[in-house]
Image (tube, helix red, strand yellow):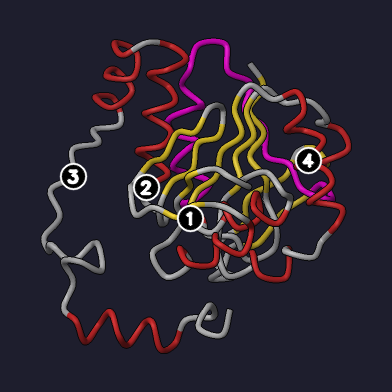
Amino acid sequence: MQIAVVLYDRFTALDAIGPYETLGRIPDADLVFVAEERGPVRTDTGALALVADKTLAEVAHPDIVVVPGGPGQTPQMTNETLLSWLREADRTSTWTTSVCTGSLLLGAAGLLRGRRATSHWLALEVLKEFGAEPTGERVVIEGKYVTAAGVSAGVDMGLTLAGRIAGDEHARAIQLLTEYDPQPPYDSGSPEKAPAHLVEEFRSRSRFVLQ
């Protein structure tokens, strides 16, 4: 099963690494990082890079497509090379997935029209522009389309999909071996739980304010 994780300049690292650590542990998985060009692709901090071993053109028909989000997603919204590849890969994929604002790229490619989907909480309303129905759920499965909420939700998405593909027992084993047992020191991981002043601060600074 070939799993293509898409990279582009200024993606968010955990958006890609969460699915890598979970989906990559499915039996017989062939996980590959892909980008327009081979070579290192920098994350949103600039301090880390992942290496794309293959170009988009070299991976035309992956079984699973994973699209991360991040600040670099915005300029990719009009990148027809990437959007065309997403549409073509989706024609034959078994699963088309995204993490965080990666769902906006699926939307821009026309793949979420009429479907429920999620994204980072700051970007949820933007999904409406692409005919999608936004929901604040952490992982949303609509047929073969699986979208995850912001950043860390990619781990949940990967485990959810691993269970669908390899069975619950294998997914539980992945969770155990990665010791994914969240016990956060703070309970402010969603806008419903976080202090209101923090929510408003980030809303006011969001790149999605004017969209």
Image: 70 above or below 168: below
Upstream in the sequence, badge 1 or badge 3?
A: 1
Residue pictured at 48% horizontal, 67% vertical: 125
Residue pictured at 54% horizontal, 80% vertical: 207
The numbered dot on residue 182 is: 3
The numbered dot on residue 100 is: 1
Left or right: residue 209 versus residue 42 is left
Nearer to us of marks 4 and 1 is: 4
The amino acid type, in three-letter code, at marker 2 is Ala
Q: Give the spatial CA distance, label 1 vs label 2.
A: 8 Å
The amino acid type, in three-letter code, at marker 3 is Pro
Of residue 135 and residue 55, the one placed in the foreground of this image is: 135
Image: 54 above or below 104: above
Image: 112 above or below 146: below
The amino acid type, in three-letter code, at marker 1 is Cys
Q: Are marks 1 and 2 in contact (CB under 8 Å)?
A: yes
Image: 140 above or below 189: above
What x and y, as percent, mark residue 159? 37, 29
What x and y, as percent, mark residue 123? 48, 67
For the record, the magenta segment spans 14-38
Nearer to us of marks 2 and 4 is: 4
SS state under label 4: helix
Q: What residue did someone put label 4 on? A: 87
The numbered dot on residue 153 is: 2
Residue pictured at 84% horizontal, 46% vertical: 84
Residue pictured at 23% horizontal, 62% vertical: 189
**Number of residues whose C-alpha sits closer than 10 Å to that of mark 2, classed few (under 14), some (14–19) or many (20 or more):** many
